[in-house]
Amino acid sequence: MKVDSHKVTVIRPKPRWLLLDFTEIWEFRELFIVFAWRDIKVRYKQTILGATWAVFQPLTSMFIFTIFFGNFAKIPSGDLPYPLFVLTGLIFWNYFSGILSRASNSLIENEGIVKKVYFPREILPLSTVGANLIDFGISLVLLFLVSFYFNFVPNPRVLFVVPLGLLIGTFGAGGLGLLLSSFNVKYRDVRYALPFFIQMMIFLTPVIYPTSIMRSSFRYLIALNPMTGVIDAARIVFSGGSNINWPILAISGGSSLLLFIVGLYYFKSTERFFADLV
Amino acid sequence: MKPIIEVTNLSKKYKYGESQPYYTLRDTLTGLVRAPFHLLNKKQKQINLNKNEFWALNNISFKVNRGEAMGIVGHNGAGKSTILKILSRITPPTKGKITLRGRVGSLLEVGTGFHFELTGRENIYLNGAILGMKRREIDKKFDEIVNFSGVEKFLDTPVKHYSSGMYMRLAFAVAANLDSEILIVDEVLAVGDTEFQKKCLGKMDEITKKEGRTILFVSHNMGAIKRLCGKGLLLDSGKKIYEGKIDNVVDQYMTSFDVKKVFEPIKVPEIDLVINKISINQKNNGKIVPGKPVQVDIDIFAEHEVKDIGIEIIFSHDDMDGRLFSTNTKSSDGLEIVIKKGNNHFTCFIDSFNLCSGKYRFGFSIQIPFIKSYYLNTDLFYFDVLETTFSNSQLPTLPMYGHVYLDHKWLIKT
């Protein structure tokens, strides 16, 4: 038996610090990975199509959106052919909305664990990033294939824009997910409103349309949506260009960071009562 | 050396019906529009008790030294599980302070987080991680866990195909290998078959006696508690009644079961009756155990003769709505009862009292069946049915099999 006599835990009515306890998170890092691993494993075990689903879903959406918004509605797509244009938007949007919806339901879905075992609760919503990263990776390969099909060679800046986009998406969706998961524990009607809310959000994100169709003042406003700057920049680099719209990307980045801080703060200040409420 | 667990003035407040605090965002938002300052005012009433609140724990202090095993004993609702939940940091205390000097492993349930789609092997890693084990530790103990569980053949089968026995064994096997200095265990022995329970008890014995680790143990099984623990804590309605040697604690707990409650006479004015006393007895020093004969005694004083009525006794389980069993002299037993002027004594004999261990409500009614009820109270008083020890496995003892034991036999044709 390992005797770790220095480990002293003091439990009091009010936590001594409200925000993150990094040593504790480090201590539970394996649990974070295990939850992510479980989600991935279960997801690919349960769906008949398995990993092909991660290809099939964005591909189908791409075709449908191309037919309706590209061909019929003739929404402009700048330098890119519409399928490539919409797919670029979709893979980032799917990443964002995937984390958001799974994180928001994570506490309720894992109610049994929350009620019986202690661990830093933020692990549950944040570990949903894992499964979504895998999906994103698969879709990204698809995106490269589609762009080669249309004879587009991405600008080398893609190596910078994609990771940055992922980072912004993770923080934004993670923060919003933390906030909504906590809401979801307390207010049981949130669960029903959420899918609708996420569905509507796709229209506030330049997935099917370019930011260029908006007045510039409105463009800055919509850049508060973290995915706006990301998708905008990704489209530029995938078309081979390098003139990224930095102010928009900066606004989106700042907004995602702010969302994360607000979400985390709210989550941490409510987390101690989750077990009593869930 | 300082005690490994130190609990000082611990209190926990709950709202009645906290188990279902069904808030909706809609209500909160409309409430906010109607009374915008309501939320602000709410903050001020903190520690004091409101009408709909109660102390699940009230000013509890105790200490546990390194290597000690402490049993926490009390009736349902005494606060045992709440203590364990607070020590496990699942829910925060309202007041007080706890110091834990060592790594804590808590086992409030076996198989927490088990996923049905995953295989036995995968669940060992999942459950181990949830209980706080590192991957390396699980690797090291993997064979031991598998051996203890006895499911090696099905290790790569999803647990949804396991029998409940296999599932429980695997789950306990993981938990039993938890390597913490303080182990918090809640009633996990109430599941599984007799063989399995013996195995678990043996393992727990090993943990306390051989490995010298500290255990906090909650159970309704006095046999197990006495065997495992040297020290005990008796709780009642959130208060500490006694702390000390386990034998004394168990004795006090057992005597608290005596059905010698003062019975307040009940008047039934419509037919001028007084129910002077109702008691439920078993020839067992006032304690009731399953499977043995029980008699219910009823004393009624009548000012004049009453005909054409039925008297009824009702048993219900504390945690459930509805009746478990009731019998009415007139409608179900077909007896014509006449309550004569003066004192009357009725006794109902039950040959084999087949309610499993747990807390029950006793109810009583006087009525003209289907026509008029003169008196009806389904919650006249509570009584406990104790658990017998493991050795009498034929007896209906375990709540996991249900609350009632039905006499039965099997016919098997192949």
Image (spheres, rainbow, N blue to C red):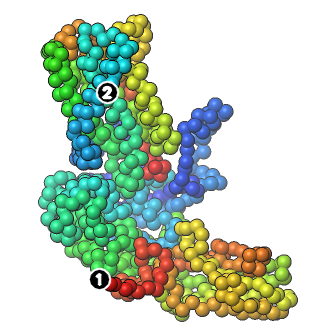
Relative horizontal placement of residue B311, taking residue B303 as reference (left or right): left
Q: Is residue A268 above or below residue A161?
A: below
Quadrant into which the N terminus of chain A falls = bottom left
Relative horizontal placement of residue A166, taking residue A251 as reference (left or right): left
SS under mark 1: loop
Relative horizontal placement of residue A195, taking residue A144 as reference (left or right): right
Q: In this view of the protein, which residue sits in the foreground, A116 or B195?
A: B195
Question: Which of the 4 quarters of the picture holds residue A138?
Answer: top left
**Residue drawn at (84%, 82%), measured in percent from left and top?**
B272
Question: Which of the 4 quarters of the picture holds residue B164?
Answer: bottom left
Q: Amino acid at mark 1?
A: Thr
Residue B363: x %, y % from top left: 65, 77
Label 2 CA crowd tier, 10 Å (few <14, some 14–19, many 20+): some
**Residue drawn at (27%, 19%), measured in percent from left and top?**
A83
Residue A199: x %, y % from top left: 42, 29
> Which residue carries the number 2 mark?
A61
Q: Amino acid at mark 2?
A: Ser
Label 1 CA crowd tier, 10 Å (few <14, some 14–19, many 20+): few
**Residue drawn at (50%, 52%), measured in percent from left and top?**
B94
| Residue A23 in sight from this viewpoint | no
Q: Are marks 2 and 1 on the same chain?
A: no
Looking at the rendered structure, the number of numbered marks drawn on it comes to 2
Rounded to the nearest whole Å, what is the CA distance between mark 2 and mark 1? Answer: 57 Å
Foreground disc of the pair 2, 1: 1
State the mark number for residue B414: 1
